[in-house]
Image: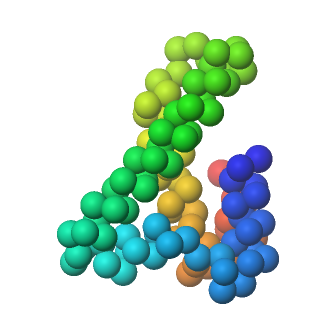
Amino acid sequence: MFFAQLVEHLLTAGPLSSCLVTNSAIERGLHDEATQKYVLFLLNSLEKGFYKVLKRAQDNAEISATMDLTSMALFLTSSMQGLLVVGKVNPAREDLERKN
Protein backbone atom coordinates (compact mmCIF):
# COMPACT_ATOMS: atom_id res chain seq x y z
CA MET A 1 0.00 0.00 0.00
CA PHE A 2 2.79 2.42 0.92
CA PHE A 3 4.62 1.98 -2.38
CA ALA A 4 1.38 2.23 -4.38
CA GLN A 5 0.67 5.56 -2.67
CA LEU A 6 4.23 6.70 -3.35
CA VAL A 7 3.81 5.92 -7.06
CA GLU A 8 0.52 7.81 -7.12
CA HIS A 9 2.21 10.79 -5.48
CA LEU A 10 5.02 10.70 -8.04
CA LEU A 11 2.49 10.70 -10.86
CA THR A 12 0.17 13.42 -9.55
CA ALA A 13 2.21 15.89 -7.49
CA GLY A 14 4.02 17.50 -10.43
CA PRO A 15 7.03 19.54 -9.27
CA LEU A 16 6.13 18.75 -5.65
CA SER A 17 6.88 15.07 -6.21
CA SER A 18 10.53 15.49 -5.28
CA CYS A 19 12.01 14.26 -2.02
CA LEU A 20 14.40 16.57 -0.18
CA VAL A 21 16.40 13.63 1.17
CA THR A 22 16.82 12.10 -2.29
CA ASN A 23 17.62 15.43 -3.93
CA SER A 24 20.15 16.33 -1.24
CA ALA A 25 21.85 12.95 -1.51
CA ILE A 26 22.12 13.19 -5.28
CA GLU A 27 23.00 16.85 -5.61
CA ARG A 28 25.17 17.55 -2.56
CA GLY A 29 25.79 14.36 -0.65
CA LEU A 30 29.03 13.48 -2.38
CA HIS A 31 30.58 16.93 -1.99
CA ASP A 32 29.26 18.30 1.31
CA GLU A 33 30.04 16.40 4.49
CA ALA A 34 27.30 18.10 6.54
CA THR A 35 24.69 17.20 3.92
CA GLN A 36 25.99 13.65 3.74
CA LYS A 37 25.71 13.23 7.52
CA TYR A 38 22.20 14.65 7.62
CA VAL A 39 21.04 12.51 4.69
CA LEU A 40 22.43 9.42 6.44
CA PHE A 41 20.60 10.42 9.62
CA LEU A 42 17.33 10.78 7.71
CA LEU A 43 17.80 7.51 5.83
CA ASN A 44 18.53 5.74 9.12
CA SER A 45 15.36 7.28 10.55
CA LEU A 46 13.34 5.96 7.59
CA GLU A 47 14.91 2.54 8.03
CA LYS A 48 13.99 2.54 11.73
CA GLY A 49 10.43 3.45 10.78
CA PHE A 50 10.21 0.54 8.37
CA TYR A 51 11.70 -1.72 11.05
CA LYS A 52 9.03 -0.70 13.58
CA VAL A 53 6.23 -1.40 11.11
CA LEU A 54 7.75 -4.75 10.19
CA LYS A 55 8.21 -5.66 13.86
CA ARG A 56 4.57 -4.87 14.57
CA ALA A 57 3.53 -7.01 11.60
CA GLN A 58 5.76 -9.82 12.81
CA ASP A 59 4.39 -9.58 16.35
CA ASN A 60 0.86 -9.79 14.91
CA ALA A 61 1.83 -12.87 12.82
CA GLU A 62 1.19 -10.93 9.60
CA ILE A 63 4.65 -11.74 8.25
CA SER A 64 7.07 -14.61 8.84
CA ALA A 65 8.56 -14.93 12.30
CA THR A 66 11.90 -15.78 10.65
CA MET A 67 12.12 -12.70 8.43
CA ASP A 68 15.30 -10.68 8.96
CA LEU A 69 13.66 -7.37 9.82
CA THR A 70 16.87 -5.35 9.73
CA SER A 71 17.68 -6.50 6.20
CA MET A 72 14.10 -6.00 5.03
CA ALA A 73 13.98 -2.48 6.50
CA LEU A 74 17.18 -1.60 4.63
CA PHE A 75 15.77 -3.13 1.43
CA LEU A 76 12.55 -1.11 1.75
CA THR A 77 14.46 2.11 2.44
CA SER A 78 16.69 1.53 -0.58
CA SER A 79 13.72 0.61 -2.76
CA MET A 80 11.84 3.72 -1.71
CA GLN A 81 14.79 5.97 -2.53
CA GLY A 82 15.35 4.19 -5.84
CA LEU A 83 11.69 4.59 -6.76
CA LEU A 84 11.91 8.31 -6.01
CA VAL A 85 14.93 8.66 -8.30
CA VAL A 86 13.36 6.63 -11.12
CA GLY A 87 10.08 8.51 -10.75
CA LYS A 88 11.93 11.78 -11.14
CA VAL A 89 13.52 10.81 -14.47
CA ASN A 90 10.84 8.44 -15.79
CA PRO A 91 7.39 9.18 -14.35
CA ALA A 92 5.63 6.50 -16.42
CA ARG A 93 3.04 4.53 -14.44
CA GLU A 94 3.75 1.26 -16.24
CA ASP A 95 7.44 1.45 -15.30
CA LEU A 96 6.88 2.56 -11.71
CA GLU A 97 4.30 -0.16 -11.10
CA ARG A 98 6.12 -2.95 -12.91
CA LYS A 99 5.81 -6.10 -10.85
CA ASN A 100 8.44 -8.31 -12.51
Q: Is residue 96 visible?
A: yes
Indicate the quadrant where residue 7 lies: bottom right
User: Percent x, y for residue 98?
Assistant: 69, 59
Looking at the image, residue 51 sits to the left or right of residue 98; the answer is: left
Q: Looking at this view, is 38 or 8 the one in front?
A: 38
Within the image, what quadrant is residue 49 found in?
top right
Is residue 75 visible in this depiction of the protein?
no
Give the percent coordinates (x, y) of residue 11.
75, 75
Task: Say which residue appears at 44% left-offset and 31% top-offset.
Answer: 70
Q: Residue at x 58, y 24 (%)?
A: 55
Q: How many labels, in total? A: 0
In the displayed orientation, state which residue is furthest to the bottom.
Answer: 15
Can you give x and y, in whole percent of width and height, for residue 46 in the image? 50, 48
Check the image and tell me how it is coloured: rainbow
Residue 53 position, x and y percent, is: 62, 33
Q: Would you identify the image quadrant in which residue 24 lies?
A: bottom left
Q: Is residue 3 above or below residue 68?
A: below
93 and 26: which is toward the camera: 26
- Answer with left or right where residue 70 lies relative to residue 12: left
In the depicted structure, whether residue 98 falls above or below residue 28: above
Residue depicted at x 42% and y 53%:
43
Relative to 18, does residue 6 appear above or below in the rendering?
Answer: above
